Structure formats: C-alpha cells, structure tokens
Amino acid sequence: MILEERACAHLYPIKFNVKSKKEKFEGKSNSSLGNTTKEAQVHVAAVKVSECSNDLASVNALLHRQSYSSAEYVKQCSRKDPKLKSCLIDSLHHLKPYLKDGIPEIELPSVEPFRMDELTLSLTGGTNGYKVQLRELYVRGASNYTVEDIQLGSPFEAVIRMPALVLDAQYTSSGVLIILPASGNGTFHARFDDVRALVKGLVSTKIRDDKTYLNVEKLDVELGVKNVNMRVRKIYRNNRILTEATNLFLRENGQEVLKAMEPQLKRKLSVLFAGIVNQLLRHVPVETFLLP
C-alpha cells in the first residue's frame, strides 16, 4: 500500500491549498467558499488516486510480463529463425556461467558442486562380497558442458558432452577384497573424462496468466565415459597395504565399478537435472525465450 501511494504521488502530485489565518476569519461566506474549494480538491484527489491505482495495476502487469524477458540469463530465439536449433543451443550455452554461480532471483543454487546423498555398490559376489557405500557425494564439472545436438518436442532428446566430472565422497567398505579383509572408512575420489550424456524426456505445458509454461515430467540420462580414474585415501587406519590393494582394484576395474554405479547414478542425475530445468522453466514462459 505504501509503495502504491508513493508511486501514485509520483504519477499524480496533488497539492492542497492551505488557507491563511486571515482567510479563515473573513466571514461565513468566505468560509463556505473555502470548504467548497477543499471538498472539490479532495474529490479531485480521490479521482486522481483512483486513476493512479488503475494505471499502477497496468504498470505492474506490464512489469510482470517483461521481468524475465529482460533477465540476463535468458537468450531469446525466434520461431521464424531458419537456424532455430542453433539459436536454442546457443541459449543453453549462454546459461553456463549462471548455472555455475546460481540464479538467486529464481532460487536456483549453484550446480558447482551439486550434491547427492549416497551410492551403494556390490562389487564382488558371495557372502563376504566387497561392498562400498559412498556418502556425501559432491560432483564438479557439470556446468562445463557443450550441447552437441537437440531434438525438440515431447519426447525431446539432447546430446551433451562434458570434458570431465569429478566426484568426491566419504567411503565405507565391507567384505573381502581379493584375499584381504576390506572393512573400513576413508575418502573416495573419481574423475570421469570425456563424458557423453544422452538426455531424453517428456514435457507438459500449463497456461498461467495467459502465458505458456513448460514442465519436464520425465527425464532419463544415459552416460558414456571414455576414461575412469578412481582412488581411495586414508582407509583402514591408513593401512598402506590395504589402501594400495583397493586402489589397484579400482584402477584395473574402473569401468566395471562405474557400471555398478550407473543405475543409481542415472536415477539421481535424472532427478537432479529435472529439478534444475524445471526451476528455470517455471519462472520463464515460452513466450519469453521463444519469440513469434
């Protein structure tokens, strides 16, 4: 209300004439005239404020419509552009620094790093099989992506490459590794080089305030990794032999360990990426980033 009054005062500055002491005591006729004048001024003020409120509502609606079209993280494309796909890919690349740092105005946190709760892996069979639990996982490198191709529609599809994803986590293991008891705690580090992600999904549309908003209903992520490097540190009370045996196993079986991770990793990445995309889409209507 205060904001509206200040805005109205700016749009319609209204001045009331204050009678001098002399004018107040000039007689009944002058007093009546003064009251009539004041009443007229109050009426004019009320009309002006009413007009202002209507104008202010129009201004607010216009600002609401334009607020995200002027957002610096939005790169607009036109449906009429013969190279629309290239423009949309450029707009996704334009988002990279904003995803890295976060976008506070739409409550989107930084994706560097993004956090996952845990992964549980069974790496060897048998009653004393080697099992690993990774907790408090932090993944870096997701904002450094390149969109190689995109197919629009529902379902949609995109091919995305990242030079590297780096994963750090707390490590807990149990069972027997090779011939050694392998129960203990430590830290886990992995680097996945030349990552290719095939992203597929379904979208729905919703009309809100005469604008069209998209929502990702389902998202699947398939990962391909060229090189895998994994290691553990400070495990088994810094037992050097067990630490080296574990790292030897991880070096020689990196792709197999990744394969064991993949089903859980896919589910968690799908939920995470869908959340990021939908946080953007619920704030930016189609009409804002895709012009007629």
Image (tube, helix red, strand yellow):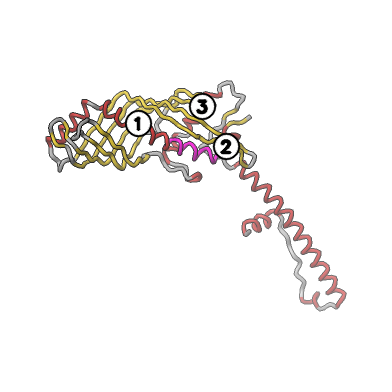
Q: Position of residue 280 (x, y in %)?
A: 50, 38
Q: Locate residue 213 relative to residue 272 in the image: left or right.
A: right
Residue sitting nearer the eye, 249 or 121: 121
| Quarter where residue 71 is shown | top right
**Three-letter amino acid code of the residue under disc 2:** Tyr
Q: Earlier in the sequence, mark 1 or mark 3?
A: 3
**Three-letter amino acid code of the residue under disc 3:** Pro
The question of residue 274 being in magenta is answered with yes
Label 2 and label 1: CA atoms lie apart by 31 Å
Name the front one of labels 2 and 1: 1
The residue drawn where x is 47% and y is 30% is: 93
Residue sitting nearer the eye, 43 or 269: 269
Q: Position of residue 162 (x, y in %)?
A: 38, 28
Residue sitting nearer the eye, 5 or 286: 286
Circle 2: is it few (<14), some (14-19), or many (20+) Cα within 10 Å? many
Find out whether the residues at labels 1 and 3 contact each other: C-beta distance under 8 Å. no
Q: Position of residue 167 (x, y in %)?
A: 31, 35
Instruction: Give the residue at the far front of this rendering.
Output: 127
Q: Locate residue 10 relative to residue 36 in the image: left or right.
A: left
* 164 shown above or below 45: above
Q: Which residue position holds label 3?
A: 155
The residue drawn where x is 83% and y is 68% is: 36
Q: Which residue position holds label 2?
A: 213
The question of residue 292 being in magenta is answered with no
Magenta extent:
272-285
Q: Split into 4 quadrants, where in the image is the C terminus? A: top right
Find out whether the residues at labels 2 and 1 contact each other: C-beta distance under 8 Å. no
- Kindly state the secondary structure of the residue where label 1 is placed: helix
| Quarter where residue 14 is shown | bottom right
